[in-house]
Image: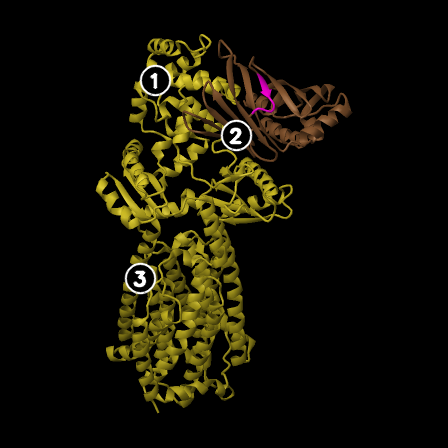
Amino acid sequence: MYRAALAWLLAFACAGAAAQPSALAQVMQRLSAVKASTVRFTEVRRIAALTKPLELSGRLSYVRGGAIEKIVESPYRERTTIDGDTMVVDPARGEPRRYGLRGHPAAWAFVEGLRATLGGDLATLERYYRVSFSGGADAWTLELAPRDEDMARYVEAIAFRGSGADILSIRVSEAGGNSSMMTLRPGSS
Amino acid sequence: MTLRSRAAVLVWIALLAASVLLVSRARITSDFTAFLPARLDPDQALLVHQLREGVAARMILIGISGADPRALAQASRSLARRLSESPQFAYVNNGEARFGAADRALVERWRYLLSPAVAPVRFTAVGLRASLERAIEELASPLGSMLAARIAADPTGEALHYLESLPAAGPATREGVWFSPDGKRALLVAETRAAASDLDAQARAVKSVRSAFAATAGAGDASLTLSGPGVFAVESRELIRADASSLSLIAGAAVLALLLFVYRSAALTLACFVPIASGILAGIALVSLAFGSIHGISLGFAAILFGEAVDYPSYLFIHNQPGDSLHATLARVWPTLRLAVLTTVLGGLSMLLSSFIGLAQLGLLLMTAILAAGLVTRYVLPEIAPAKPVAVARLEPLLAWSALARRRRSVRAGALLALALVATAAALRPGPMWNDDLGKLNPIPDAERRADERLRAELKAPDVGAVIVVRAPGREQALERSEALEPALRGFVRDGLIAGFETASEILPSESVQRERRAALPDARALRRALEEAERGLPFRPGLFEPFVRDIERARDGPLLGPEDLRGTGLGVKLHSLLFPLRGEWIALIPLRGAADPAALAPKFDALDAPGARLLDLRRETSRMIGRYRGQTLELTALGVAAMFVLLAWGLKSAGEAARVLFPVLLAAALETAALPLLGAPLSLFHLVALLFVVGTGLNYSLFFNRAPRDPDERRRTLLSLTVCSLAVLCSAAALSLSATPVLHAIGVTVLLGTPLALIFSAAFGRERA
């Protein structure tokens, strides 16, 4: 459960790593300085249940200490919000559904880890993931592998590519053959 | 000692030993439903069932406050986990998850019989197409991987349809758990497995909650508030127990001091306690034998009997003149004393006949104790007590009040005038004369009552308020009748007549509805064909929906869902509270939430003319029931007084004499009945009990005042004995009036006021002798 949720949530974890402490620290510091942002994204979603990948596009927004929002605009409309411990999925057709994240330790560990990361808290991030960092502050790759077995059952690996405080792509590999490759366009909104 | 008297003493000792044995095993209860009638009509039976067994009655409401929200939420989670591990609780919820794993598994398994959306059109190509388009979005959503297996088996989302069709009443969540609107208190509910009337189990449950909270990490600053009927019942039992035992001690000590002062003899003082101690022991033994247990309030009432029954030995000892043996004194006093004992016993009889178990207990206790005390005074005391005449002269100051009684004309006129004035004032006084609220019998302080109301409102917990009761001869019919009401009830919600409702049939549909749903499911071939058509142009992997086809097939061929399948789930607990057998029929309850205007609702409900269904306001029903039986008690009291009159006429061999004896006592009782509501307390049943007691003791006074004394010394001894007796009653009544338990307090105040009135009126209206 929550495999994709975790993967997706992690997509917001604009985080630093341990390989080159100085570059990692620099990236972390710059990420934590971000107070709010909204960017356009395109996502290629490969789902085991479907014979061909889905291409989604829309907007992502983040406010430090507040809600994280993913708005799909094409090929259909859907708004997903994470606020505190609750995820709300609001499809254009159908009623919004609310999911409590606390009931699922893996999901909750992830959300807590994510928030710590966004706040520039490397120590907390490392409590949840094995972190590897490569490249320099201007072109970096951050790879995360969940430490928690429960969570590893859903998410195999997450990789961010970025430049400075900008995240350029997020790749999430899920167990069971699902994956997501999200490309972000910093500066767009 | 003669052989006969020796036999009497031996019988007394044997009975005493048997009583002690029984009393040592007596079980004390404080279940306030004991003060409900024993013979019940169906509505009342349901009411009592709800008060004793109902879910609302078994719910412990829990609030945690006094720390920051994060710490409170942490404590709430930890407490909820500990409590759900305990076998004492059937259901624990702090808002983290509405449905547990067992509920989800149940719904998953039975979804095609449970979901209200199941209909033939849903499984046609057109119906499926809409579901499948939505399924793609769900798969692509952040929760897609989590939902994949569910979508393959349940693409039409029947499990969710069912769960979402159930009413969700609960407070808002914060940090993932329920919180009060101001965010200062984390909220939980825990439902005990034991009935609310099983006080020992309730006490254990309350203790478990407290110790689980104490063991909760980080609960340091936070404080725990517990509420709910069970919690209150446990607390009142403690309060009443403490009250009853300490008050009995205080009353006993005060009376002891008085008697020591009067007799200046340890032997006589001790002997004074022998009859009443025997009587109370015998009374408690008989009550617990007859009723299986004794109510805390009955025990508290025993305290006042201390005052009454030391009377009998006092009449004997004080009338004992120098040179007389106790036997000789007894020979002179006994005819009057016998009448005094018998009239009081008659007063108890009218309580014993009451439909209220509690009153019947009090009646039996009173009758047994008084009769036993009378018999012990007559047959045992002369054998074991010394003859030590009291020096009346020393106690002359105690008789000062009798100067008042000698001004007979003024007292008589004053009494009648006071009665007229007070009765007029009472009649003109606004507000109800009677208090029929059962809850007010609880000794729970008002502050805690308010805390309970607040917690209840914050938790949106079920309140014992408006409810529709559906009756049927069988379970299925009850479910069907309840089901038939649902559309009309939804209309009521739309019209704003009610905020919501809960039915058993929403949880467990009737078999006929389940059959209808089962018949709506297509066979595997038809379903595959419809799926194929619906999937056209959508990128689903071939064979993805095989689990769906398999599950529909299984539901088509499978059995219907019965209540036993819900065992061990939260839904099962809920169902059980809404659907249960009672006295040979089945009851389906439909609690209504937020019925703001019952007067507007009632005609709309009546217009439905639903078979077997009645709209009840449980709170009003309780008061009505108490009121009705209060009327019965009044009738019994009147009958009791009439019986006393007959007994007096027989004993005094003159109806005129009997009237003369009875009149001042009834006058005192009437004056007091009118005066009590003016003093602030509307009358309750228990005032009535206390009034009966006042009449009983008052008759003692009146009988002795009307008895012809042998000489002036005896006349003064009579006056002294009555003075001492009424002082003894006042001592115990004063102790009782200190009680925090409203019932005991009411009895105390009534006796405290009535006894002096009865004494003075008896003196003023009694036969005039030089």
Report the mark closest to the observer, 3 or 2: 2
Residue picked out by circle 3: B633
Report the mark closest to the observer, 2 or 1: 2
Residue B409 vs B178, above or below: the answer is: below
Task: Check if residue A186 falls in the magenta segment.
Answer: yes
Callout 1 amino acid: Gly
Counting from the top left corner in percent of width and height, residue B706 is at 33, 82
Chain letter for the brown colouring in the rendering? A
Residue picked out by circle 2: A81
- Residue range corresponding to the magenta coloring: A181-188
Chain letter for the yellow colouring in the rendering? B
Report the mark closest to the observer, 1 or 3: 1
Could you tell me if residue B301 is visible in this image? no
Residue picked out by circle 1: B127
Question: Between disc 1 and disc 3, whose residue precedes?
Answer: 1
Counting from the top left corner in percent of width and height, residue B534 is at 37, 12
State yes or no: discs 1 and 3 in contact (Cβ < 8 Å). no
Q: Give the chain of mark 2.
A: A
Element at label 3: helix
Callout 2 amino acid: Thr
**Badge number at residue B334:** none
Element at label 1: helix
In the picture, the quarter occupied by the C terminus of chain B is: bottom left
Closer-to-camera residue (B348/B549): B549
